Image (cartoon, rainbow, N blue to C red):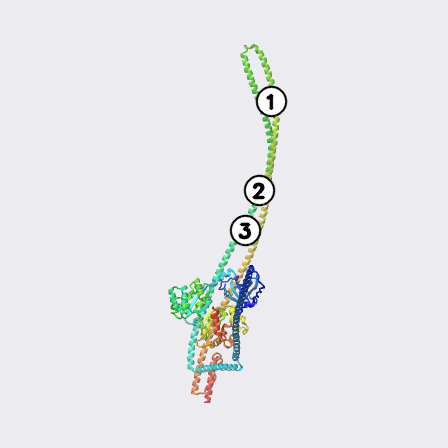
Amino acid sequence: MNEYGIDDDTRYCFNVEYYDNQAELIREYQLMFFPSDNSIEMYDVKQKKIYLKRVGYPGIQLRDLIIGATIIIFSRPLLIKSYGDRFTATKLISKLERSLLVVRLESNVLLGDLFNYIIDHGYTINQMRLVKFSKETAQEFLSISYSSEETNKYISSLLSGLVYCFTLMKENCVNSLSNLLGPEDLNQASINYPESIRGFFMTDKENGFVHASKSIPLAEEEISFIFGVYSNNMFERTAKFKDCTLALIKPHVLKQGLIGEIIIAIIKGGFEINDIQLFNLETSNATEFLEVYRGLMPTFTDHVNELISGASVAMEISHPSMNQEQIVTEFRKFVGPYEPGIGKQIFPMAIRSVYGYDWVHNALHCTDLPEDGPMESDYFFNILCS
Amino acid sequence: MRFESEILYPQKPTPQRRGYRQVDHIIIQRRKDEAEHEQMERQNNYYKIMDKKADFERATIDANRRYKLYKNYTQLKNIRREQFEERQKKLATLFEQDRIEWAKLIEESRETVFDRIQVMKDEIKVLREKREARKKKENDNALYNLWKNNCHEIRGFESKLREKETAVALEQQIKQREIARKAEMEYTKIWDALAENNRLKKIEYYNNEEQRKKNLGMYIGRCLEEQIEEINKRKQEEERLREVERQYDLERNKMIELEDKRNEMLRKQNAVATRREIEEFNKENIRRKAEEVQKELEMDLNIINELKKEMDNEKEEENKRKIKIKRDMDLFMEHINRQRQIEKERQKQIDDAYLQEYNKQNRLLYEKWKQEQIARDKLMKDVMKARQEQINEKLENNKREQEENRREMEKILENIKKYEEEKKLEEQKNMENKKQYSSDLLDQINYKRMNNEKLQKQEEEDYQRNLKQKQEYDDLLEKTKLLEQFKTKLKIAQIQKVDNSHFKQLPNPALYSTYTQDKLHDALLMREAAESSNKSE
């Protein structure tokens, strides 16, 4: 039995889709996953025959098999559409309880620690973004789960500082997250419960604000408020689209749980994170974004596959004392060569050298040309969001 | 100015009137209609043309717009493509530059021979420094030791300190040894207790096992006894069954006899009964008839007697008639007698007829009886047969049971045999186990004894060694004291500058073969050095 309470004979079934580029067809399969030996099997639904015989595939874990996620099996991106049978649905649906966590930080110094804290406590980050509340939106958001008095009390803290919103996923997520918050009195939290979120991250005792969903329906409502269809029109973006560069943390880093470390490294390097959001890129988006590198990289499709293999985090980076050209070139130098093998020889302490292991899995993508900085930032924080 | 329609459709020239003709209204009307129709057609055509024109104009405008859009689009696309290509080029150059730069950096970071030599030199330098420091430290230590050894006061003091230390150490050693001995004692005690406990447990286990075996044996004995009882019972049962068989045989014979007897008796009875019945029937009949006739006759006689009496009474009166009447009477009597005979004959006839009838009835009855008897016999036979079959069956069962009995007895006997064999084997095994266990115990005891002996020996040896060491230590102390004295004397001699060559002869050098030899050697060196310094002076 492992963390998911798996028996030896357990078999999970998922309905998956594969877009065949050559035939320009969407093909449907059933993907069987056997957690006892981490093996997979694929069944062609239309032709009614086995497409892939049962074979061990250590690259895939049960936690990767989430509805809506894309997994790459033998270099084919498969989009998980739904659960294939009732057993899988009943077994896994309880693991997908979601909750919203809103943390208002004074500065982004503790952002990396916040990521580490969340990952260390076993939560999966489903959605994440930096939110700039207006007075109306703040009032509307707070009125979902707070009374009018409390809304008036907390509204000022939401209007200033940096407010990071996370959609977290875990079994019994709502309860465990509310237990993690700590007492509401911030002074008491910092003295008696230094391990809680309030105790650890609330440096500003007066304006500090941490919120976690109080129940599952409220959580869904809040998540749809912050990350829903109208969210982009409601919230103003904090991205400046000027004198900036884009850093895109690749999915393999998120899978390894090292995103916090990378953010800490960037902030320690003196850079500022203007805007941050978690994206689940589709093949078309990833291809469009990396189109300029086609022909320049020998492993272009691998790059695309890596970007669509999971969630990636986009950040708009700037520096108070640097112009457009400087920020791009400096940040490029800061993260190190795009080939970690070379980086380990000449800049062993650069981010890519430390956290990357080959050209495709080189921890993060950053803007290469100075004039591309605002354009790439615009692509992520304007075009993709809308 | 002419309309387009006029150009396209020119008016036909009106025909010239050739001469006066009478007005035909119908024709005029028709012409009018035709003219109107033509006019309308012309107008229609005009509208159609105008529509086509408008369509054409619209299509051209659309096409122009589309063309412009396409132009703009292609222009933009081209610009974008150019930009894209430019970006790609820039990126390619950037990557190239990066590659060159990295290659340079890698090249720079690669170690050359000179770098290696330099690094090695540095390492040598560091190592040399370390070595020198170590040597220096060693020299200092040696010098310090030399100085310390030469200084008698310090040495005396140190020796005293050492003495004290050794005394303390010895005391500690003794104490530790005592503690160790105690600990060992405790340890052995614990182990002994454990062993004793184990032994007791083992004994208890063996006792329990023996008890269990005994119980088992008893149980098996009881079982065997029960089995023997069972066998006896079976035997008794067999005998009983035999007896029953015999009885059945006897019963059968008796039944046959009884049947015969009954048949005989029945026959006899039938005969007697028929005889008796016939007799009784005849007798009765005759008697009854006779009686009846007699009664009638008596009645007749009585009547005649009465009449006679009456006649007697009227004798006188009827003298005359008497004779007549007498005659009549005689005649009547004769008639009566005749009648009597006739009656008797008739009775005989009746009896005969009756007998015939009776015989007939009798025959029928006998036949019926016979039939019934045959039926009864048949029934009796069936009953007897069934009974016989039952008896046979029972006999067969009996035989079967006897066989089973025999088989079970054989089985039981086999079991008993087997059990006895097993018991024998188990006893043998037990005996072997016990033997082995006793031999093991003996081995253990021997081993323990040997160990004890060894320990004792070792303790004795230790004691002897300790004694020896102590003695050696005392000797050494004496020697060192002697040496001290010798050295003081030497020093005094040095100070007094007295010829001290006679000190070269040391007392027996074999005594200094211990660890003090080194120190002594040092002392000798010192002396030689002192001598040489004296000489140089």
Q: Nearer the viewer, residue A175 or B323?
A: A175
Residue B537 position, x and y percent, is 45, 89
* Residue that numbered label 1 is attached to: B347
For the view shown, which residue lies furthest in the front direction? B20
Q: Nearer the viewer, residue A365 or B191?
A: A365
Q: Amino acid at mark 3?
A: Leu
Point 38% across, 65% down: residue:
A150
* Residue that numbered label 3 is attached to: B224
Q: Amino acid at mark 1?
A: Gln
Q: Amino acid at mark 2?
A: Val
Query: Marks 1 and 3: CB-CB under 8 Å?
Result: no
Residue B310 located left or right of residue A104: right
User: Rounded to the nearest whole Å, what is the CA distance between mark 1 and mark 2?
Assistant: 66 Å
- Asked whether residue B186 appears in the rendered view, the answer is no
* Residue that numbered label 2 is attached to: B244
Dot 1 alpha-carbon crowd within 10 angstroms: few under 14, some 14 to 19, many 20 or more: some
Q: Chain of mark 1?
A: B
Residue A237 position, x and y percent, is 44, 70
Q: Chain of mark 2?
A: B
Dot 3 alpha-carbon crowd within 10 angstroms: few under 14, some 14 to 19, many 20 or more: some
